[in-house]
Image (spheres, rainbow, N blue to C red):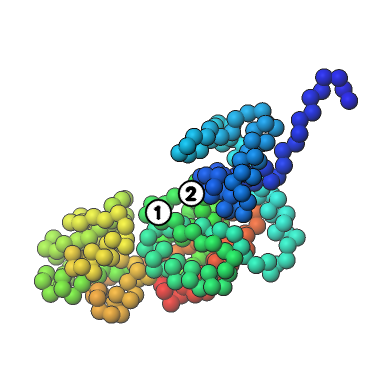
């Protein structure tokens, strides 16, 4: 051995996985639940990792954990290493490997309520070893930042950083409750909207562009009287007779079949088809828990759209 050479103990894969688990879970106790070990085991693993790297990775206090700059940098490397190991295991694992672990699914509340929830029931019965975590976000989010495995999105996907699996398409319609239409009547043309209460979404103007052509031959941009940040709230307002809303079919199939919502200006609507897609991490091999859910969603969702 060369004189003066310092030999440090090597870090292990288990230590890196424990570190990543703490970051993703947000606490040592939740990470221990995910990994099925005692919290003290996780704590000792973190201490060994900091000792081997000779740096502080996490600032601990009684309320939360704060990752240092070095800790956040290590997360990038640790995830990459862990993903590579997972890929190797996937390659040599039987194709029929049973899905397991935690599946995090992100989506806006209408998607989770009307599309994902019915599928989750079937999925959980079929794959009892998978714990499903539904993450509600009305806005488009980074699935890496949110630590999601899958996100279900309405509309075209242009981000090439993700893998994309098409789920189906769904129409938009103008809808109102029978009680509202009894009081205000049916609009016959876009100019009549000024005499009605219009329900719209908070966000870009494209969200409040309805598939009805105006005098210029363009889709009608409305100025909503009542604005909601969620499509599910919009649906509820329409059901309560608060006004006219433009809502996607997968949210209102039951409402329309039961006569709770009635289509407005049916002859003039431009039935544009809204895409629904599942996006997921494009790097590496798709885990069985993810592929199983996407396959089931594609198979079972046709009657929901």
Q: Residue at x 45, y 39 (%)?
A: 63
- Nearer the observer, 150 or 170: 150
Picture quarter with the N terminus: top right
| Residue 250 in the image, given as x and y percentages of width and height | 37, 70
Label 2 SS: loop
Mark 2, residue position: 146
* Secondary element at tag 1: loop
Q: Residue at x 55, y 44 (%)?
A: 28
Q: Nearer the viewer, residue 298 or 159?
A: 298
- Label at residue 137: 1
The circle drawn on residue 247 is none
Q: Is residue 252 visible?
A: yes
Q: Nearer the viewer, residue 190 or 82?
A: 82
Is the C-beta separation of discs 2 and 1 under 8 Å? yes
Residue 19 falls in image quadrant: top right
The image shows residue 121 at horizontal and vertical percentages of 48, 71
Q: Spatial distance from mark 2 to mark 1, Cα to Cα?
A: 10 Å
Query: Is 273 left or right of 65, judged from the image as shown?
Result: left
Give the mark, 2 or 1, whose residue is nearer the N terminus.
1
The residue furthest right is: 1
Relative image position of residue 239 (x, y in whole percent): 23, 69
Residue 107 x/y as whole percent: 43, 58
Nearer to us in this view, 247 or 268: 247
């Amino acid at each position: 051995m060369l004189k003066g050479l310092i030999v440090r103990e090597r870090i292990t894969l288990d230590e890196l996985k424990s570190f990543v688990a703490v970051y993703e879970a947000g606490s040592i106790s939740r990470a221990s639940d995910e990994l099925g070990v005692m919290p003290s085991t996780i704590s000792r693993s973190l201490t060994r990792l900091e000792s081997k790297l000779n740096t502080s990775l996490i600032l601990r206090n009684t309320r939360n954990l704060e990752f240092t700059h070095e800790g956040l940098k290590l997360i990038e490397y640790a995830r990459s290493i862990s993903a590579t190991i997972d890929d190797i295991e996937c390659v040599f694992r039987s194709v029929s490997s049973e899905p397991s672990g935690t599946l995090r699914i992100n989506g806006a509340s209408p998607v989770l309520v009307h599309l994902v929830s019915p599928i989750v029931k079937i999925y959980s019965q079929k794959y009892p070893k998978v714990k499903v975590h539904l993450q509600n976000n009305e806005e488009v989010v980074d699935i890496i930042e949110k630590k999601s495995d899958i996100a279900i999105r309405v509309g075209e996907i242009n981000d090439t950083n993700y893998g994309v699996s098409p789920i189906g398409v769904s129409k938009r319609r103008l809808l109102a409750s029978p009680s509202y239409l009894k009081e205000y009547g049916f609009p016959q043309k876009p100019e009549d909207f000024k005499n009605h209460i219009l329900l719209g979404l908070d966000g870009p103007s494209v969200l409040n562009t309805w598939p009805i052509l105006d005098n210029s031959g363009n889709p009608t941009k409305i100025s909503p009287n009542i604005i909601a940040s969620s499509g599910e709230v919009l649906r509820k307002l329409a059901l309560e007779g608060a006004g006219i809303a433009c809502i996607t079919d997968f949210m209102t199939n039951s409402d329309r079949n039961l006569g709770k919502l009635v289509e407005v200006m049916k002859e003039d609507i431009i039935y544009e088809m809204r895409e629904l897609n599942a996006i997921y991490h494009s790097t590496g091999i798709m885990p069985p828990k993810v592929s199983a859910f996407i396959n089931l969603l594609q198979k079972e969702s046709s009657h929901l759209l």
